[in-house]
Amino acid sequence: MSRLSGPSRITVTGICALLSLTMGCASPSGVTRTYYVAADEVDWEYLPAGKNVLNDEPAPVEVLRVNGLEDTVIATVFKKAVYREYTDSTFTELAPRPPEWAHLGMLGPVFRGVVDDTIVIVFKNNTSHPVSVHPHGVIYQKDSEGAPYTDGTEGDDKHDDGVPSGEIHRYVWPVPERAGPGPMDPSSIIWPYHSHTEEVKDVNGGLIGAMIITRRGMGDAEGRPTDVDREFVTLFGAQIENTTQYTAENLARYTGDTLRVGPNGPRFFYGNGYHSINGYLFANLPLETLTMDEGDRVRWYVFSSTSFNDFHTPHWHGGTLLINQKRADVADLGGPLLMLTADMVADNPGIWLFHCHFGEHMEEGMSSRFEIRPATGG
Ligand SMILES: [Cu+2]
């Protein structure tokens, strides 16, 4: 059994928590935040608008190489597995995704915590094979790590490694000081979470999401940092569709149908990779979900996925950001599963490009847009 087996055993700690009992505090620290999350199989559409939204022309998507040899298939819908939030432990009703998180797309729900909190994930595996939830940054015991390897454990301490199809596992992640923002960080930071059972296939397949951890005393009741107006989470990810749990199924689905286009698959040297932002190509991430108001203090959490091609340089047009106390408009995600937090003041109204500045990734559709709406002056 885990050392922390449930919310009832969590104690309130921290100076702010003590203060909050008597004089009120920005954050009621030391609470347990429980999420009901399943891994669900879905058909994911990388290109819901059916075109390159940046120029209204057909998107040059040539991605799925059949048998790795001569034929290329144009396909933008793939069977994947994604994390989805439910309302309770019956896992019968999906929790509606709040408008502020509509831009997450393929990503799982955002888990929040303030330093001293405990995050609990009640996880159900609705897929056809074992998967897990492995967090970064927070504390976990062996029953809450979500990764199989020879570590001298057994029983419940193994069940988390790869939760069998149809089963439920409870992951318990305390949030200590060392999971919160460091001295150079702003009031909240991002950590990834993802399945680590067959890590490469699972993440390419879609099982990845983000946690946001807020500094003690800097979170509201929901754990939101109180010194920002908007938050956005974006994954710059090369989704390698020929290395997922569903590759054979997806190939069977498309091989031989009318989408087969012949022997020349130009620009196809990565192995069926989609260079997407939150699972969208060519600015198909809906603009209305990445919208803010002039004057907003906007926090961007950006991270990269786990493949060889996951080195990215997110570039925001129209604004500048503070990253690690330095001014920039391009961020450095110089390798797989890196993460950073970037703060922008939305001072320049307009519709702006937001893309990876690595040339090949741009050409393959790793771009999006955001909008700053002008202040009305009223
Ligand atoms: Cu890139």
Image (cartoon, rainbow, N blue to C red):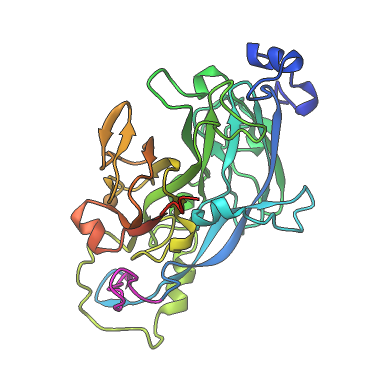
Is 18 magenta? The answer is no
Q: Position of residue 158 (x, y in %)?
A: 63, 34
The residue nearer to you, when weighing 346 against 46, is 346
Depth check: 104 or 162 in front? 104
Question: Magenta residues, as a range?
Answer: 50-67
Examine the rendering and report whether any part of residue 233 can be seen: yes
Residue 367: name its quadrant: bottom left
Seen in the picture, residue 353 relative to 10 is either above or below; the reply is below
- The residue at 71%/26% (across/down) is 31
Locate residue 84: give its quadrant.
Answer: bottom right
Q: Is residue 254 above or below residue 168?
A: below
Q: Tell me which residue sits at (35%, 75%) in the image.
A: 51
Query: On the image, which quarter does residue 327 sit in?
Result: top left
- Look at the image and tell me whether residue 155 can be seen: no
- Left or right, 18 with reference to 186: right
* Residue at 44% in and 65% down: 247
Does the segment drawn in magenta span residue 54?
yes
Left/right of residue 362 with respect to residue 177 in the rendered view: left
Residue 16 in percent (x, y) is at: 64, 15
Quarter of the picture containing the N terminus is top right
Left or right: residue 21 versus residue 262 is: right
| Relative to 5, residue 317 above or below | below
Left or right? Give the position of 98 relative to 62. right
**Residue 254, image x, y percentages:** 42, 78
What is the magenta segment's predominant secondary structure? loop
Q: Name the residue nearer the viewer: 3 or 82.
A: 82
Disc count in the image?
Answer: 0
Residue depicted at 46% across the width and 31% down the height: 189
